[in-house]
Image (cartoon, helix red, strand yellow):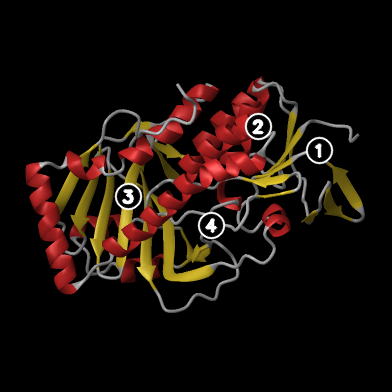
């Protein structure tokens, strides 16, 4: 028998830390390994929907957040309202660093060891390889180390991603009195999402543009803010003014990984982005990771059964995100027809649009 905890989790991001807490709640011994020297996170925002929020509530984790009042679709070039869909309780706007900090605090309070500065070069059936001939044995490994991590390489070594023809920028800028809502400014071949964070004086920006090619090696790299501004130069004044404040911006190519053909191999099981990287058009990456973390902790004795139960829901969410990408970038007569339909829905029953995602938001994996 291998000494050590029952469960080793590779990666101390949202999925990994949440899974560590959920495993501990089931009485399992667990440890977390992280390659970064400390549990820090670069500045970015995310949206926690009720389905992910229920997991945080069940874990007793309450990050600093703003309540989101609505999703507001706007014609980017005219600045004209298309539809504003009011949201019920449970939709939160969170700085990623605040969520990581809250999860890490709960992990420490639970007495779960988190070992930082652990760089893993490869995963094998019962051990991690750290280089220099150092191996770390494990009894069961949860791979929460992302789409490019060694866990994914071990479980699905031949699964390749496809460039979507889109790149994304992200930035945070100071603002005053921004509405507490997620705004989506749509336009031909590009769109921009923005929402406030923390005290409402910081605005998170994710902007997407269609491109024919993407050759950068990294998943995210610094870019010239002028390129971001140029891509949205014909958008309405409020967006141009916001983009004028951008001093630092990162860009990355959006890759379609689809559903990894399998999420487990032997004692190794993938969750979150390692299992199913999600395009950022439905704001569900963190929420699905939280669902994975909770449900796998309950079903860790039979990962194949857990996967069979999770796959249909995850596949539906990934397909919905792809559909949004196309709808946000319409042009010509298709855009005019779609925008007219949205304006009509806005006048008649704006809440009906959000109700289409009841299957997603109202789901409760905790059984609460």
Residue at (32, 50) in percent of width and height: 194
Distance, label 2 to label 4, CA atoms, is 24 Å
Which mark is in front, 3 or 2? Answer: 2
Q: Could you say which disc has been placed on residue 183 in the image? A: none
Q: Which mark is residue 20?
A: 2
Residue at point 52% right, 43% down?
310
Pinpoint residue 244: horizontal percent, then vertical percent: 31, 60
Residue sitting at x 64%, y 45%: 144
Q: Earlier in the sequence, mark 3 or mark 2?
A: 2
Rounded to the nearest angstrom, the CA distance separating label 2 from label 1 is: 15 Å
Decide: few, some or many residues near mark 1? Use Cα within 10 Å; few <14, some 14-19, many ≥20. some
Left or right, 14 with respect to 88, comes to: right
Image depth: mark 1 or mark 3 in front: 1
Disc 3 marks which residue?
A: 194
- Name the residue beneath numbered marker 4: 259
Q: Count residues near mark 4 (Cα–Cα under 10 Å), then give few for <14, some for 14-19, many for 20+.
A: some
């Amino acid at each position: 028998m291998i000494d050590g905890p029952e469960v080793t989790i590779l990666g101390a991001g949202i999925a990994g830390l949440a899974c560590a807490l959920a495993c501990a709640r089931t009485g399992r011994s667990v440890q977390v390994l992280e390659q970064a020297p400390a549990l820090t996170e670069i500045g970015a925002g995310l949206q926690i929907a009720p389905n992910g929020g229920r997991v945080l509530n069940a874990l007793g984790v309450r990050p600093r957040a703003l309540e989101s009042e609505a999703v507001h679709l706007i014609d980017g070039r005219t600045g004209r309202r298309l539809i504003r869909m009011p949201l019920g309780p449970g939709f939160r706007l969170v700085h990623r660093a605040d969520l990581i900090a809250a999860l890490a605090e709960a992990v420490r309070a639970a007495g779960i060891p988190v070992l930082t500065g652990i760089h893993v070069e490869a995963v094998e059936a019962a051990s991690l390889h750290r280089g220099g001939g150092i191996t770390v044995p494990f009894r069961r490994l949860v791979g929460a180390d992302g789409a490019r991590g060694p866990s994914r390489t071990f479980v699905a070594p031949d699964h390749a991603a496809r460039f979507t023809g889109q790149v994304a920028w992200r930035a945070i800028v100071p603002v005053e009195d921004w509405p507490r809502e997620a705004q989506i400014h749509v336009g031909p071949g590009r769109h921009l999402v923005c929402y406030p964070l923390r005290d409402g004086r910081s605005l998170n920006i994710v902007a997407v543009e269609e491109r024919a090619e993407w050759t950068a090696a990294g998943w995210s790299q610094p870019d010239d803010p002028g390129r971001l501004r140029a891509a949205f130069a014909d958008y309405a004044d409020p967006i141009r003014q916001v983009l004028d404040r951008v001093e630092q911006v990162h860009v990355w190519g959006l890759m379609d990984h689809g559903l990894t053909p399998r999420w487990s191999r032997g004692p190794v099981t993938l969750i979150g982005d390692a299992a199913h990287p999600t395009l950022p058009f439905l704001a569900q990456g963190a929420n699905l990771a939280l669902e994975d973390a909770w449900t796998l902790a309950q079903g860790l004795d039979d990962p194949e059964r857990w996967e069979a139960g999770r796959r249909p829901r995850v596949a539906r969410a990934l397909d919905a995100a792809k559909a949004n990408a196309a709808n946000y970038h319409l042009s010509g007569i298709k855009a005019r027809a779609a925008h007219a339909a949205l304006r009509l829905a806005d006048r008649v029953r704006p809440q009906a649009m959000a109700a289409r995602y009841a299957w997603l938001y109202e789901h409760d994996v905790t059984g609460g």
